[in-house]
Structures are given as C-alpha cells and as structure tokens.
Image (cartoon, rainbow, N blue to C red):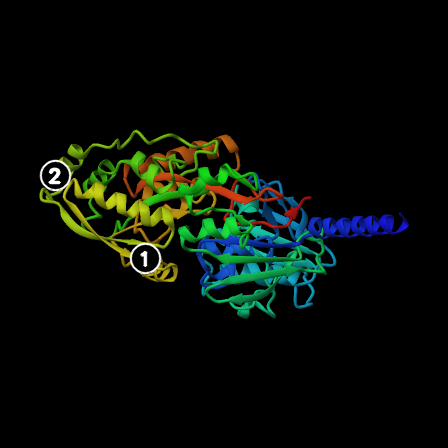
Amino acid sequence: MKSLVTVFGAAAITLASANAALSARTDLVIGVVLEPPHLDPTAGAAGAIDEILYANVFEGLTRIGPNGEVLPGLAESWEVSEDGKVYTFKLRAGVKFHDGTTFDAEDVKFSLDRARAEDSVNAQKVLFSAIDTVEVVDPLTVKVTLKRPQGSFLYNMGWGDAVIVAPESAETNKEKPVGTGPFRFDRWARGASVTLVRNPDYWGEPAALEKAEFRFVPDAAAAVPALLSGDVQAFPNFPASDALEQIKADPRFAVVIGSTEGETILAMNNAKAPFDNLKVRQAISHAIDREEIILGASNGLGQPIGSHFSPANEAYEDLTGLYPHDAEKAKQLLAEAGLADGFSATIKLPPTTYARVGGEIVTSQLAEVDIKLEIIPMEWAQWLEQVFTNKDFDLTIISHTEPNDIDIYGRDGYYFGYNNPEFKTVMAELDATVDPEKRNELYRKAQRIIAEDAVNAFLFQLPKVGVWDAKLVGMWENSPIQANDLTKVRWTD
C-alpha cells in the first residue's frame, strides 16, 4: 500500500509539474503576411515594419492604445501652453536602450530633428512639419515649440514613424534595431522570420512572453495548415478568409473580427494620361462593383467606403452613393473623354490577398466597359520602389493602414499625383484647429472633395480578421495603428 501511495504521489507530482510547465508557456509564433524591407520604422513606408517593431522594440513620446487613444510613452506627462504652441514633455527616468546606452532628452531632440531635417528619409516627414524648435531643458525635460497650434500633435508623436532612436544606433537600425521597448531584437532570418526576446531591463511592466517569432506566411494556402498544426499560434490578420468557418468551428481557436485603419483603394495615377482626366476617373468609379469586390477580396467582411476615411471615425461621411455601379454611365463618361473605344492600361498588384484577388475582379469589371488591364503581380519591395517611390504605374490596389491619413491627398509628390489647392487649404485649416467639432466638419469637407474628384476608386475598409489560440489573451481586437503590440499578451491555463 505504501508503495502504491508513493507511486500515485509521484505521478501526481509529475502531472502537476507537467501542468505547471504547460501553464508557464512563454513563447509565441505569430504569422504575418509580409516581410518588411528593413527594420527601421523611421525610414520606410511599409506597414510590415511597424507590425513587428512598434511598441515591442521601439517607443515614442506617446503611444497609440488599442482603442486609438493617446497614452503616455517615453514621456510620462506633458504640459501645453495656453496658445497651444509649446509642449513640455517630462520624460521617464531610468530608461535604457537595448544596447545599454541611457535614454534622455538629447535622444528626443536627436530623433525629432532627424525626422524633420531637410535630408530626412522619414516616410511621414509631414508629421513633424509643424515643429519649430526642440530644446533640451534638462536630461528628463524636452520643450517642443510649434510654428502653429496643431490639434493632432500628440497623436502624431504616437506613430511608428515618430519613435525615439539613439544617435549611437540610428544608422544601423535597418538591420539591427535598438529601441527602449519591452522586447529586444534577436535575429532576422531573411525570407523566414524575425525573432524578438524579452528585455530584462525594461523600464515598465515586463512582458509575459520571453520570445516572440514573427513568421512570414505570404501564401494564404499555407496559413491554415500552419495554424491547425500548431506551428503558428496566432495570425493577427488571417490571410485565408475562405477557411474561417472551418476555424470558427474548432474550439482550439478564437476568431475575432475587428476593424482597421486600412482604406483599401483602387489607386490611379492622376498625373498620367488618361487618368489625369476627371471623366476617366469617374468612369472607373462607376465601372467597379464594390460589393462584388468586397465579397471576393475580403470574404464579405470589408465595410464599403466612398472616400478615404474610416467608418469607425466619428467624422465619417457615407459617400458610397456618389458613384453607384453603372456600366452604361461609365461608357458614356469614357465617350465624353474621347475614349469611346476604351483603352489599355496596367494594374500592379502587391502580394496581399485582398490586392491579388481584388485585382482580378477589377480587371474583369473594367473589361465590361472596354478598359483592358494587364495584371502585373509584384513583391512588396518591388511595389514600394516602382509604385510608391517612382510613381511608375497606371493602377494599383493597396490598403493604406496609417491612422487618419486623409492628409496624404494634400502632399506634393505623393504617388497618386493628386493636386487640388482647395483640398490643401482645408488640410491647413484642419492642422491648425483644436476644437473637435470644427475638426470633424473639416474632415467631412475633405472627404467630399476627394470623393467628387474621384481621385481613386474607394473600395472598402480592410477588416481585421484575427485568429489565434484560444488560450492566448491580450491580442488586439482592432488595429487603430499598424501594429501587433505584444506588451500585454500572455498564455492562460
């Protein structure tokens, strides 16, 4: 009997140990569709960079929370002058970069001055355009003086493009990123994954995960077996939407449908004939069947949009009825533009599922009005170089996931070549306006201008289809910013 008790006791201890080991899991493999071109959020437009590095490795003065709110970051507090032009930031004490160098006010001045410099390569340089001076008051105090009041300044400082970097490591962040966040960069296996490990010297609450591997799964067909086999435990943006019903029926997984800031558009090169003709752009807007595209490219989960603005924003105006699907109207407009027989063009598509599938549907729809498209599939780096940087394109499909980014339509030299002085005036007024109601009014006016100008064909708001192990908690339901913030993610029993 004593032997049996001993055996059962030993078995119980073994089982308890096994359970403890299971409940103590601290590693996570996250599936992401795109591999970033490099790992420096301050030097590239690719959202894939922020999806891995934002809030995990790099931090800014402020940060954007899961509901789109502005939260303290490396600045624990701030004061704003009565005229709205001077921001005095009180920085956190005891913060170190991952290479052991000390974070202080000099790093903030370096980062902001670098981002707004004449030779800056920051993809969102406009975020810093209102800054006049950055002064170091003392090691933990920075004073930023603006040229004019800017209602979105604190929000802008929470973007991935505004993270704080150190002069000692800034030039090598593309390959070996060094930040202040709860995770340190471990390694980048090109074509396969980026691995982060917990930062033991983090200034704030330590991350529950000891290791997080962001694995690149560009093929939607590979996402399902990777998930079902347990090779990948979480897809913040699940690419295989056709398999959702199968996944939903499996109790091992949580399926969470949320919203993003991703306005998905059929972008047109407004600076190139025939897309420089309003009637041609209006014809294309009438020729597309938005509902068919949403059904095919987002499994019916995308929300229709009629301008470049998120339906989740309180300033959203529904303009989807401005250009209803009408093939005959499209043909009439093409005839008025001198193109009664139609024309030929190319459509360059990045590797995302929504773009590739959406591009096929758009090509079929435009063929009905005698616009013949040649589909040119591209890898992400190719798209960034040819379309975004060199503006060498006719049409493309892309989802702009930056938050509240309608201002891109007022930027000189932006890739779709739109130039409207009236729109720029509205943006300038918005930038200087603090009152929320007035800002919303200006946002609505801006939406109407670009919709009436048919700058692009506005398709749908990209849904966030999150699929992960049901034992994971802390994953973001929505994506108010292009990020996979792992600071609160942990495994439960």
- Foreground residue among 328 and 489: 489
Q: Position of residue 266 (x, y in %)?
A: 30, 45
Query: Could you say whether the residue bearing mark 2 is in a helix, strand or loop?
Result: helix
Say left or right for 277 vs 245. left
Say left or right for 297 vs 207. left
- Foreground residue among 44 and 9: 9
Query: What kind of residue is marked 1?
Result: Val
Q: Position of residue 458 (x, y in %)?
A: 33, 40
Q: Quadrant of residue 340?
A: top left
Quadrant where the C terminus sits is: top right
The mark that comes first in sequence, 1 or 2, is: 2
Q: Quadrant of residue 425?
A: top left
Q: Position of residue 231 (x, y in %)?
A: 54, 55
The residue sitting at the right extreme is 2
What residue is at 51 percent from the left and 62 percent from the top? 193
Q: Is residue 156 above or below residue 333?
A: below
What residue is pinned by disc 2? Answer: 336
What residue is pinned by disc 1? Answer: 387
Query: What kind of residue is marked 2?
Result: Glu
Q: Position of residue 205 (x, y in %)?
A: 72, 51
